Amino acid sequence: MKRFPPKWKALKDAAVGRLINKRSGRLAEHYLCADCGDFFIARDVQVDHIEPVVSPKEGFQDWWTYMNRLYCEADNLQVLCNLVTNKRQRKNVKRGRRNERQANEGNASR
Ligand SMILES: [Zn+2]
């Protein structure tokens, strides 16, 4: 997690302030989903690459390109709620974009 500061910057940029979490009834920091425009708590959002780490058109090129995109600046990142993220991942699998999905999963598990 510490290896990826732009991610936290992107998250901070999307923060809208402390609101009452509808589920727990407690005050919590909420974040704006770039896709549906709703507010969510940190647990319900993901930081997503606007430009995919592995381009679906070009495929995997080389490690330099891969790392460059993976550790991109915050302006290539957007905050999305889990609903949107799940929908996109399902779409990606259908299109055969497994490389990108695996890259994202590998990133999240570390
Ligand atoms: Zn959303």
Image: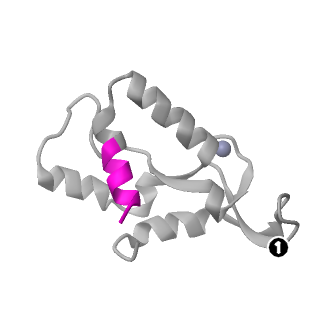
> For the residue marked with disc 1, what is the amino acid?
Leu
The quarter of the rendering in which ligand 1 is drawn is: top right
Q: Residue furthest top?
A: 95
**Quadrant that contains the N terminus:** bottom left
Q: Dividing the picture into quarters, in which one does residue 19 lie?
A: bottom right
The region drawn magenta spans 102-110
- Residue named by callout 1: 27
Query: Taking 74 as reference, is 69 above or below it?
Result: above
In percent of width and height, residue 92 lies at 41, 30
Residue at screen point 27% across, 41% down = 54
Q: Is residue 14 left or right of residue 52?
A: right
Q: How is colour applied across the structure in the image?
A: one colour
Q: Main secondary structure of the magenta part?
A: helix
Q: Is residue 104 magenta?
A: yes
Report if residue 17 is visible in the image: no
Q: Position of residue 39 (x, y in %)?
A: 74, 54
